[in-house]
């Protein structure tokens, strides 16, 4: 359960103050698949950083599973990210010169999970993300773009987070591979009941979610449910 | 983060760029190796000088006429210029408790002719006790006897070097040499003692003290007295007793003589060598410092290169301290391995120096431990700032970094 109440983020450049987020409030229930849309500079990245506990808002409260995240210290934020949030980024998702399996195990290293349990959970997450087992021991630079994003999704899943945050996950992919990746998200949402927040500027991608939040000039301008597009053959 | 994970991360990031890691490590290797080598060579030099001075007799007190000027050391003493020590002084000192032997001596340079060779060397007038006091052994023949001494005999004993210089391969025993145009009969040759500085007994010719004083130099005073003390631990007491006795005998309030113990000479030389070793080690340390700066430089480059990776690690839950530890351990592992290789290299340099026969080097355990400590400390000191910079990176800025 995510509750955002009157969140404002102000950046100061010299004497000029600029509100990247202006009094934004919304609630996302567990198991929802939400897309956040907006043109570049709209504040959607700032919103994502706040939701991802990478940054604290200037004012307002952000409750994640009932816990107020907006006032935590750096180390407490790191713990929230480790235990409750899984990230999928547009680019540079994986560590170079490192195997797929080790990349997925990385969050468990910081969580202090033991060796065998680590590998078991990483493999489970990789299967859930739809990656073929013969890629597990490949280096991260030996696999394709679509596979990279599946590994990134597996890494986001491996800690059993309450929330998966995907920042333009299809931005670097061709439309067909992009569809497959979005299909993976839909499957995780529908079959495993994961809460997913997808940040994108593409209307077409956003339509795959249950609900779309539009951000413009730091304001929440629209909040609507979609006529959901279902990707049927997402395993292909 | 567990130790094994840190080790894993460190290994994979250092091995990802082997050439760079190796070159950076080289700075530490050279620094540590030169410190180890310099300190060991210094220690070796000190040990060899100590052993050769102790070879003179560690229970030896040397009494010389005149006063040693404080700060001017033993070299510029008034030896030879003052005429305050007499034969009677030696007789009195002989009766002091704790004095084992006393050797009154007169030394002077004379022209010596023998076997057609002409040389200028030090002639020492000595008594039979000279051999015992100075730890000398006779190779062939006899040393000066009491009979020679009483009869003002014309007998000479040759030091090992002098014997070779004058007679070459021939046996000098029984031959005649001319010292200051007076004939002397060679009755003995000494074993070489070696390594005692500029005017050791190897370079001397010995004649009876009475002959020296009455015939060669014509002077009744002594150039020095060497006293060997029964018990090493009584050196100070015996020294004080001799001082008191001589003051009374000479009827003076301020000493017109000086008593030098082996410890005084040893102390002076040890100080000189220690200073020299410190100086060498300081120069070597500069290369260690440069090596440390090399580590810091590399770590700063690494942190900049891996900004995005740091951002990613932070996004998936790494704390400031996790990132800090990871980068700090990279620097420490570099210096630790560099230090280890440096110790081996320094040790090899020492073996090489020893094998040339110049100095017997000594690699001490303490210098190895200090080198290890210093190299690890350099890792911590020069790795701290880059690691802190990595840990302080804001995950948002780090992820955006191009």
Image (tube, rainbow, N blue to C red):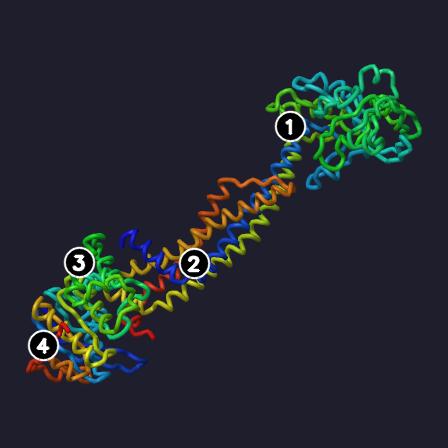
In primary-sequence order, the first of circles 3 and 4 is 3
Residue A179 located left or right of residue A144: left
Q: Quadrant of the C terminus of chain A?
A: bottom left
Q: Tell me the residue that label 4 is attached to.
A: A232
Residue A121's mark? Answer: 3
Can you say whether B275 is above or below B16 in the image?
above
Question: Mark 1: which secondary structure?
Answer: loop
Spot occupied by residue A37 in the image (x, y as percentages of width and height)? 16, 81
Q: Tell me the residue that label 2 is attached to.
A: B382
Q: Nearer the viewer, mark 3 or mark 4?
A: 4
Residue in view at x 43 percent, y 58 percent: B382
Task: Using a 10 Å C-alpha cutoff, classify the residue at mark 2 as few (fewer than 14 neighbours), some (14 to 19) or many (20 or more).
Answer: many
CA–CA distance in space, label 4 to label 2 = 57 Å
Chain designation of label 3: A
CA–CA distance in space, label 4 to label 1 = 100 Å
Q: Tell me the residue that label 1 is attached to.
A: B58
Task: Using a 10 Å C-alpha cutoff, classify the residue at mark 1 as few (fewer than 14 neighbours), some (14 to 19) or many (20 or more).
Answer: some
Chain designation of label 1: B
């Amino acid at each position: 359960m995510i509750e955002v109440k009157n969140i404002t983020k102000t950046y100061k450049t010299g004497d000029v103050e600029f509100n990247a987020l202006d009094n934004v409030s919304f609630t996302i229930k567990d198991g929802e698949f939400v897309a956040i849309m907006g043109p570049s500079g709209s504040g959607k990245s700032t919103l994502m950083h706040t939701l991802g506990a990478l940054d604290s808002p200037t004012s307002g409260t952000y409750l994640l599973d009932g816990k107020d995240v907006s006032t935590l210290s750096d180390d407490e934020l790191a713990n929230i990210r480790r235990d409750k949030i899984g990230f999928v980024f547009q680019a540079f998702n994986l560590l170079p010169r490192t195997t797929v399996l080790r990349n997925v195990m990385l969050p468990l290293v910081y969580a202090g999970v033991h060796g065998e349990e680590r590998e078991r959970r990483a493999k489970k997450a990789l299967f859930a993300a739809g990656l073929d087992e013969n890629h597990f021991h490949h280096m991260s630079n030996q696999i394709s773009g679509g596979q990279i994003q599946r590994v990134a999704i597996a890494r986001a899943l491996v800690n059993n987070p309450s929330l998966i945050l995907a920042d333009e996950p299809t931005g670097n992919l061709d439309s067909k591979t992009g569809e497959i990746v979005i299909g993976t998200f839909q499957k995780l949402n529908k079959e495993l009941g994961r809460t997913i927040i997808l940040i994108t500027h593409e209307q077409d991608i956003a339509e795959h979610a249950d609900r779309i939040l539009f951000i413009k000039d730091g304001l929440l301008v629209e909040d609507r449910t979609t006529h959901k597009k279902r990707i049927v053959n997402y395993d292909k | 983060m567990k130790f094994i994970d840190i080790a894993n991360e460190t290994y994979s990031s250092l091995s990802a760029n082997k050439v760079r890691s190796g070159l950076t490590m080289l700075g530490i290797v050279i620094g540590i190796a030169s410190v180890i080598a310099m300190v060991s060579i210094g220690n070796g030099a000190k040990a060899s000088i100590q052993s050769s001075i102790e070879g003179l007799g560690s229970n030896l007190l040397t009494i010389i006429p005149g006063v040693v000027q404080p700060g001017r050391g033993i070299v510029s003493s008034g030896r030879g210029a003052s005429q305050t020590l007499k034969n009677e002084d030696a007789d009195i000192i002989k009766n002091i408790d704790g004095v084992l032997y006393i050797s009154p001596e007169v030394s002077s340079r004379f022209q010596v002719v023998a076997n057609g060779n002409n040389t200028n060397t030090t002639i020492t007038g000595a008594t039979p006790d000279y051999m015992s006091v100075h730890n000398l052994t006779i190779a062939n023949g006899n040393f000066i006897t009491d009979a020679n001494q009483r009869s003002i005999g014309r007998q000479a004993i040759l030091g090992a070097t002098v014997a070779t210089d004058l007679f070459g391969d021939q046996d000098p025993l029984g031959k005649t040499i001319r010292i200051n145009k007076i004939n002397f009969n060679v009755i003995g040759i000494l074993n070489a003692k070696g390594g005692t500085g500029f005017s050791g007994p190897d370079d001397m010719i010995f004649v009876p003290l009475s002959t020296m004083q009455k015939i060669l130099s014509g002077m009744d005073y002594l150039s020095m007295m060497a006293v060997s003390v029964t018990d090493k631990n009584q050196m100070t007491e015996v020294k004080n007793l001799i001082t008191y006795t001589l003051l009374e005998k000479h009827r003076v309030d301020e000493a017109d003589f000086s008593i030098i113990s082996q410890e005084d000479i040893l102390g002076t030389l040890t100080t000189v060598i220690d200073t020299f070793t410190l100086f060498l080690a300081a120069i070597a340390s500069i290369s260690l410092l440069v090596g440390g700066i090399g580590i810091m430089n590399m770590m700063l480059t690494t942190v900049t290169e891996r900004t995005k990776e740091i951002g990613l690690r932070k996004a998936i839950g790494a704390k400031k301290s996790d990132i800090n530890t990871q980068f700090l351990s990279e620097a420490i592992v570099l210096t630790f391995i560099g230090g280890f290789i440096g110790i081996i290299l320094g040790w090899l340099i020492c073996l090489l120096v020893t094998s040339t026969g110049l100095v017997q080097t000594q690699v001490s355990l303490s210098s190895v431990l200090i080198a290890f400590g210093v190299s690890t400390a350099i890792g911590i000191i020069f790795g701290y700032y880059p690691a802190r910079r990595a840990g302080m990176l804001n995950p948002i800025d780090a992820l955006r970094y191009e």
